[in-house]
Image (spheres, helix red, strand yellow):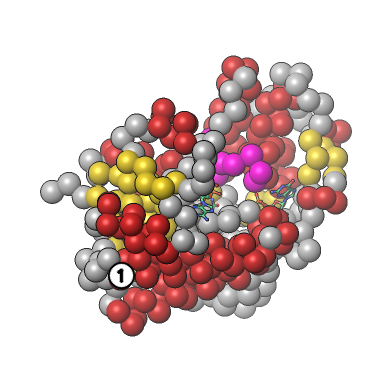
């Protein structure tokens, strides 16, 4: 029988990939879109006409109850958030309202509309909840049992979302799972995140459209995977007989300098340093120095494994941006 899914954050990177995946599995897909005259509406309507869009906002419980009544979903994927860590330092209260309390609003909408025993719920938790400070496990990587120590208003808000999801699972027996996802990137990554900022600048430098890129701290290391692989993990979590929490990661960590080296290498530049300027504007009040995930549980229980490795990820992002910039259409 055909299933129905409601995705919040449909205009974001993961919303795009997840909708493609579910459509390929013959789901009826609903997507929550916010705001008056959202500029991303036209793109979604044009590229993914199979999505049934519903207006709503994570801070507005009544809109979420209405969305539940319209979609009557079997599965709800809560991907909506203020998701940029740097932005969360500048807008901590908005971040708490959307990224933290917004999760509670979605869970309550499911209960109010009578779905607590039938609807399966996915919460987009994050490696930012660990914060890079759990030195109990050097080299092993963070797994589901590692200590949390968030280092940004974003990480703190996500930790609330994580725990309230677990609380609803324990209190009301809801099929509610949290995916603790490490950084995942790709052609649809927002231009405000460092990987896409670099892949786009590299393409523009190659085409003579700009001559350098300004970045913040170049030393942090991240466990970077491909978004297309990670949405499959989200779906697998909701297909399990029991809800649970899972880390999705590659088990490798690379610095921003490693990313720069590979990305500039794609356009035949061996020494990237003359093209990169550091600007304190892009530094954060507190930094997460290193993230490394341990995806063994997801590999064992879900049968999930990332397919795209780090060099292939950089290559596909630069290739995509070279094509986009050459045709002058940034998405
Ligand atoms: P993204 O590209 O930044 O997308 C965020 C989405 O949230 C957008 O569709 C945005 O809509 C929507 N949104 C923001 N505020 C909202 C509100 N008040 N009401 C309703 N929708 C709102 O994020 P992503 O990379 O796809 O990530 C998806 C989720 O996974 C997020 O929750 C993120 O925090 C989490 N996560 C991401 C990563 C990663 O590496 N990508 C890793 C771990 C966890 P507009 O287009 O209208 O702004
Ligand atoms: O930063 C450094 C920055 O913004 C990565 C979100 O999806 O993944 C993402 O959060 C690193 C940081 O991602 C610039 O200081 C240097 O150390 O690409 P980012 P993030 O902060 O890791 C997690 C898992 C999420 O959950 C989040 O939603 O790069 N960096 N220079 C820079 N970062 C940015 N954005 N811009 C710079 O110019």
Residue occupying image coordinates x 40% and y 57%: 63
Residue 6 position, x and y percent, is 33, 52
Residue sitting at 57 percent across and 50 percent down? 224
Residue 314 or residue 201, whichever sits in front: 201
Give the main secondary structure of the magenta stretch: loop
Pointer 1 local density, CA inside 10 Å: few below 14, some 14–19, many at least 20: some
Q: Position of residue 14 (x, y in %)?
A: 46, 47
Q: Quadrant of the C terminus?
A: top right
- Is residue 191 found inside the magenta-colored segment of the image? yes
Q: For the magenta stretch, what is the residue range?
A: 185-193
Q: Is mark 1 within 8 Å of ligand 1?
A: no
Horizontal arrangement in the rendering, residue 44 relative to residue 290 (left or right): left
* Quadrant position of residue 115: bottom left
Residue 303 in sight from this viewpoint: no
Residue 256 % position (x, y): 71, 47
* Among the 4 quarters of the image, the one containing residue 202: top right
Determine the residue positioned at 30% across, 79% down.
172
Residue in view at x 46 percent, y 61 percent: 60
| Residue 325 in the image, given as x and y percentages of width and height | 63, 22
Classify residue 112 by image quadrant: bottom left
Q: Is residue 139 above or below residue 275?
A: below
Side of 169 relative to 123 (left or right)? left
What is the count of numbered marks?
1
**38 left or right, relative to 94:** left
**269 falls in the magenta region:** no
What SS does tag 1 mark?
helix
**Residue, disc 1:** 112
């Amino acid at each position: 029988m055909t299933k129905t899914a409601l995705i919040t954050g449909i205009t974001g990177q993961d919303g795009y990939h997840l909708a493609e995946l579910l459509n390929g599995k013959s789901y009826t897909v609903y997507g929550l879109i916010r705001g008056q005259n959202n500029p991303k509406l036209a793109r979604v309507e044009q590229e993914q006409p199979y999505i049934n869009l519903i207006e709503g906002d994570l801070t507005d419980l009544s809109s979420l109850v209405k969305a539940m009544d319209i979609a009557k979903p079997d599965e709800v994927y809560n991907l909506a958030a203020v998701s940029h860590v740097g932005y969360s330092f500048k807008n901590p209260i908005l971040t708490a309202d959307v990224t933290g309390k917004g999760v509670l609003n979605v869970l309550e909408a499911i209960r109010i509309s009578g779905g607590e025993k039938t609807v399966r719920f996915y919460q987009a938790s994050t490696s930012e909840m660990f914060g890079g400070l759990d030195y109990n496990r050097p080299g092993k990587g963070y797994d589901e049992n590692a200590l949390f120590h968030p280092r940004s208003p974003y990480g703190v808000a996500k930790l609330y979302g994580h725990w309230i999801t677990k609380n609803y699972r324990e209190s009301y027996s809801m099929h509610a799972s949290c995916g603790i996802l490490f950084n995942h990137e790709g052609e649809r990554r927002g231009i405000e995140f460092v990987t896409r900022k670099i892949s786009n600048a590299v393409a523009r430098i190659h085409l003579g459209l700009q001559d350098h890129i300004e970045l913040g701290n170049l030393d942090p290391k991240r466990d970077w995977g491909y978004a297309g692989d990670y949405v499959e993990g989200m779906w697998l979590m909701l297909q399990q007989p029991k809800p649970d929490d899972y880390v999705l990661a590659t088990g490798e960590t690379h610095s921003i300098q490693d990313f720069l080296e590979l990305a500039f290498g794609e356009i035949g530049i061996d020494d990237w340093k003359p093209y990169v300027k550091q600007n304190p504007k892009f530094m954060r009040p507190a930094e997460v120095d290193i993230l490394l995930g341990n995806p063994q549980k997801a590999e064992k229980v879900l049968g999930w494994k990332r397919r795209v490795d780090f060099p292939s990820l950089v290559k596909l992002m630069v290739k995509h941006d070279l094509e986009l910039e050459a045709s002058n259409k940034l998405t």
